[in-house]
Image (cartoon, rainbow, N blue to C red):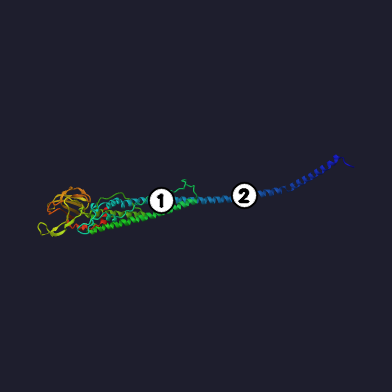
Amino acid sequence: MRLPNAGRRLVPALVCGLAIATLWAGAATWYLVFHDEILARFVSQQTALQYAYEERIGALRLQLDRAMMEHLATREGLAARLADLSQRQAAMEKRQAQLSLLEGEAGRLAATADRIAADDPAETGALGYASPVTDPITKSQVKTQTKSTPKPFPTPDAFELRSRDGAPGRQSLRETEQVLAGLDQRLDRLGAHQIRTLDGLGVRAIRGSQRLRDIVIRVGLDPQRFERQREAGIGGPLVPLATDPFGIAVGQVQRALGEEERLRRIASALPLRRPLSGDYSLSSGFGPRLDPFTRGLALHTGLDMKAEFGESARATAAGRVTVADYNGGYGNMVEVDHGNGLATRYAHLSSIAVGAGQWVDAGASIGRVGSSGRSTGSHLHYETRIDGEPVDPQRFLRVLSGSDAQFLDAR
């Protein structure tokens, strides 16, 4: 029996529905049977992934913490180095101030030395005695003898302990380390330069003291003679000296400079300079001679220096005028007390330019050459006395060479 058309179309639909139902029942059955196992496996996978992720995060965090600690330690080290460099810089600047003071003390009259080199030594009082007849030193010789005075040690520029753009911390640690290393080397060089400068100052002061002491000894005087003249009134607050090597060295240089200055004052007070600025010749020396009036032997207590009438007579060292008047056979006479028992006399003057009690500097005019008193013609009678006793003035006049005179007057 043949089914109608509607029945024939319904059979495939029923078969299809049955297959779908069968598949759904199978799937449902499989899902119900294996659901827990699938879920457990899925959860296990997710848990493993989470653990791996957390472990990775922990490792990265530990690595980051270690890097941060290293970075912090490096920055702290750089900060400590920076603080140390700042302290060293402050110490260097303090040392530089001390060196500047010492340099200024050692060469404070460098301009005077230049002026002496430019002026006529006959006017400044530099001696060039090689014989009883003077041989004036020329300007070119004085310039040749002048030693250049070292320039003051330069004050160091402030170190820029910061980044290039002016904002701290914006440059890399490597760049910062390079900058600090450069500053460290610069401070080392500056410290070495300061030590060399200090050593040079000390050596110059010692040599200067020895040179001045030799001048005093060549005159025939004992430098200890002048110790008695030191003032007794001293005092002041107690300020302990520095105990670091540089501070000790500074103290030694200061003492050497003080000794040089003391000897310079002593040597400057000696009548070593020329009493006449122009050319002259000796008409009579110191010692026994035939008296020009009696023609018998007599002691001549000074030097007779032949000079033009009216020529300026000059003080051979700084001192105070004790006599400025007519004095018997001396005629018009000026006596200058230079301290420490030293005195000079200038006699037979035509006129006197100073008064008793007046202070005169070395080279100052004290009168004019003439022929007053017991004299046969225009000349200057010049005497030097130690503790009131006349001594040969050549003892003083022959001591200084041109360079010694410039060295003595340059401070």
**Residue 158 percent coordinates (x, y):** 41, 48
Give the labeled residue for mark 1: 89
Does residue 203 appear anywhere in the picture? yes
**Residue 399 percent coordinates (x, y):** 23, 58
Give the labeled residue for mark 2: 53
Q: Position of 192 compared to 336: left or right?
A: right
Quadrant location, the N terminus = top right
Q: Amino acid at mark 1?
A: Gln
**Cβ–Cβ under 8 Å for marks 1 and 2:** no
Which-is-in-front pick, marks 1 and 2?
1
Q: Name the residue rendered at 30%, 57% in the picture.
A: 207
- Circle 2 sits in a helix, a strand or a loop, which is it? helix
Q: CA distance from mark 1 to mark 2?
A: 53 Å
Q: Residues within 10 Å of mark 2 (few under 14, many from 20)?
A: few
Q: Which mark is residue 47?
A: none
Q: Position of 409 compared to 306: left or right?
A: right
Could you say which quadrant of the image residue 14 lies in? top right
**Residue 232 percent coordinates (x, y):** 25, 51
Could you say which quadrant of the image residue 228 lies in? bottom left
Q: Amino acid at mark 2?
A: Tyr
- Circle 1 sits in a helix, a strand or a loop, which is it? helix
The front one of 6 and 126 is 126
Does residue 410 appear anywhere in the picture? no
